[in-house]
Amino acid sequence: MAYTAEISRSNPSCIILLVDRSGSMASPIGGQMRQPKAEAVADAINRLLFELSIKCAKESGVRDYFQVAVVGYGQSVGSAFSGKLAERDLIPLSQIADNPARVDQRIKKVPDGAGGLVDTAVSFPVWLEPIADGGTPMNRALKYAENLIAGWVKEHPGSFPPIVLNLTDGESTDGDPLDSGRAICDQTTADGASLLFNLHVSTAGGKPVTFPDADGELPDSHSRLLFTMSSILPSHMRSYAASLGYRIGEETRGFVYTQISAP
């Protein structure tokens, strides 16, 4: 399968972010800031949505090259958007850009023109709030994403396939998620199978692993399971990753393992 379909307003693609919001996400990520994992993930996703909106912006406004869903799973499973977008699933990117729940002011260090750095206030749109409560119903979250994709591919049969990114710090508490992950990849457009990538943030030890093609360096059965669930990167994604300096092979998967300090 080629993964060569052009992404455009008339032929968009979709991105689904699955966000672990279980109680363990309240623990800190380590380092000097000791920031809770839930906060770090929320900041990362808010930044991603903002940067994606900027990349898709033209003089006429943000173009709907993508529809995006952010699905949280913890005490419940469902849309993680706040504000006007609450309880909505796949949303055109222009509507996301126009409807943050709020806009915070953050301090960012920028060059001062004389070789140093100076603190500057910058606007930071917020769509996702940090939440950490309940178990880790990963199976339900993956099935939720599968249902969204099944409807989407019927409406967009020729589009670049959907991409699902699952961010988690723990083991599924509602059963083995392997079949649910495979069911996502069974949903196809004419351009290829849907892609499932996993980011595992763990305290299990071991060194960080990015885009592996085998599971030999992963520290436990859970990280190896998430690796097995992850899609092999299409050729153009492998080429891009290689251009960034990663060691890439034909079997490289969309999987990242990040080790953090235990609380």
Image (spheres, rainbow, N blue to C red):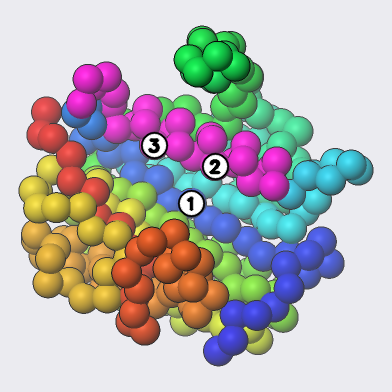
How crowded is the residue under tag 3: few (<14 C-alpha within 10 Å), some, or many (20+)? many
Would you name the residue on which mark 3 appears? Answer: 41
Q: Quadrant of residue 34?
A: top left
Q: Are marks 2 and 1 in contact (CB under 8 Å)?
A: yes
Tell me the quadrant of the picture where the C terminus can be found.
Answer: top left
Q: Name the residue: 20% across, 52% down.
A: 208
Secondary structure type for disc 1: strand
Task: Name the main secondary structure of what is drawn in magenta.
Answer: helix
Q: CA distance from mark 3 to mark 1?
A: 11 Å
Q: Name the residue: 13% across, 35% down.
A: 261
Point out residue 129 in the picture as x, y percentages from the top left corner: 47, 28
Magenta stretch, residue numbers: 31-55
Point out residue 153 in the picture as x, y percentages from the top left corner: 65, 74
Q: Quadrant of residue 262?
A: top left
Q: Earlier in the sequence, mark 2 or mark 1?
A: 1
Q: CA distance from mark 2 to mark 1?
A: 11 Å
Numbered tag placed on residue 48 in the rendering: 2
Secondary structure type for disc 3: helix
Numbered tag placed on residue 98 in the rendering: none
Is residue 27 something one can see in this rendering?
no
Point out residue 77 in the picture as x, y percentages from the top left corner: 42, 47
Secondary structure type for disc 2: helix
